Image (cartoon, helix red, strand yellow):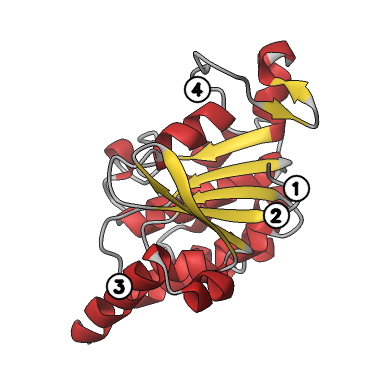
């Protein structure tokens, strides 16, 4: 059960079930047993168009069309004005990044966004999600190496986007888990630990060991 407005980070090794949980919540497929409900209503009973207006998925590798930043954003909300698009960049504290691009909103991103880094593609995907103003946000964090400045921008934008929204993050970086209100550690398709980052560290269980290993590896790269 995830209370409205809570930010939950799903963590665990590859194959533990994190992505499956996120896909079930987003109704990218349906469970064979049990059900998923939002606000007490089974997703099976929710109109798909209504669900897509209220729930946005930002995948690990966001798809961008070989057009401009503006056109990629308008794909989510065709009626949005330039003022509204710019306001979304400001809301996520990304306006400085936008104006650093060669032509601002008119910057061409290349085939599948190939002119941008993986981190920059995710920045555009976060702005695209912001424009929709969803109630629920599902984020599969990019695993590709990003430079420090872009990682800071992604983290800052995610925090702003998640404010007041129910957010489920598939956290590949445990720094994301540390910022979430709640951490759910999965293994073999099951929840093995559930609590706040600090509480799980105090328990000294599997999450604490995983986090200590991640911190050690991160410090070793400096």
- Residue 46 horizontal/vertical position (percent): 73, 16
Q: Which of the labelled discs sits on residue 6, or is there none?
A: 2
- Residue 172 horizontal/vertical position (percent): 36, 57
> Could you tell me if residue 94 is visible in this image?
no
Say which residue label 1 marks: 3
- Image height check: is 28 above or below 96? above
Left or right: where 193 falls relative to 45: left
In the image, which is nearer the foreground, mark 4 or mark 2? 2
Q: Earlier in the sequence, mark 4 or mark 1?
A: 1
**Residue, x 42% and y 52% (percent of image)?**
141
Left or right: where 106 falls relative to 132: left
The crowding category of the residue bearing disc 3, from other C-alpha atoms within 10 Å (few below 14, some 14 to 19, many at least 20), is some
The crowding category of the residue bearing disc 2, from other C-alpha atoms within 10 Å (few below 14, some 14 to 19, many at least 20), is some
**Residue, x 44% and y 71% (percent of image)?**
175
Looking at the image, which is closer to me, 49 or 202?
Answer: 202
Q: Earlier in the sequence, mark 3 or mark 1?
A: 1
Q: Earlier in the sequence, mark 2 or mark 3?
A: 2
Looking at the image, which is closer to me, 218 or 197?
Answer: 197
Say which residue label 4 marks: 28
Q: Which of the labelled discs sits on residue 214, or is there none?
A: 3
Q: Are circles 2 and 1 on residues that touch, CB within 8 Å?
A: yes
């Amino acid at each position: 059960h995830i209370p409205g407005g809570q930010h939950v980070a799903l963590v665990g090794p590859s194959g533990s079930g994190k992505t499956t949980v996120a896909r079930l919540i987003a109704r990218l497929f349906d469970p064979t047993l049990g059900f998923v409900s939002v606000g007490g209503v089974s997703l099976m009973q929710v109109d798909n168009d209504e669900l897509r207006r209220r729930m946005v998925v930002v995948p690990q590798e966001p798809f961008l069309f070989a057009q401009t930043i503006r056109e990629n954003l308008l794909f989510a909300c065709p009626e949005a004005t330039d003022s509204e698009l710019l306001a979304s960049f400001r809301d996520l504290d990304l306006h400085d990044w936008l104006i650093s691009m060669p032509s601002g909103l008119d910057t061409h991103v290349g085939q599948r966004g190939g002119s941008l880094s993986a981190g920059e593609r995710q920045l555009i995907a976060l702005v695209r999600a912001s424009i929709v103003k969803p109630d629920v946000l599902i984020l599969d964090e990019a695993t590709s190496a990003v430079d420090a400045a872009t990682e800071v921008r992604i983290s800052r934008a995610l925090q702003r986007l998640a404010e007041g929204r129910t957010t489920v993050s598939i956290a590949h970086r445990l720094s994301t888990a540390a910022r979430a209100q709640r951490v759910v550690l999965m293994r073999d398709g099951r929840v093995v630990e559930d609590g706040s980052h600090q509480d799980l560290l105090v328990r000294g269980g599997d999450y604490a060991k995983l986090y200590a290993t991640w911190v050690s590896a991160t410090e070793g790269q400096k």
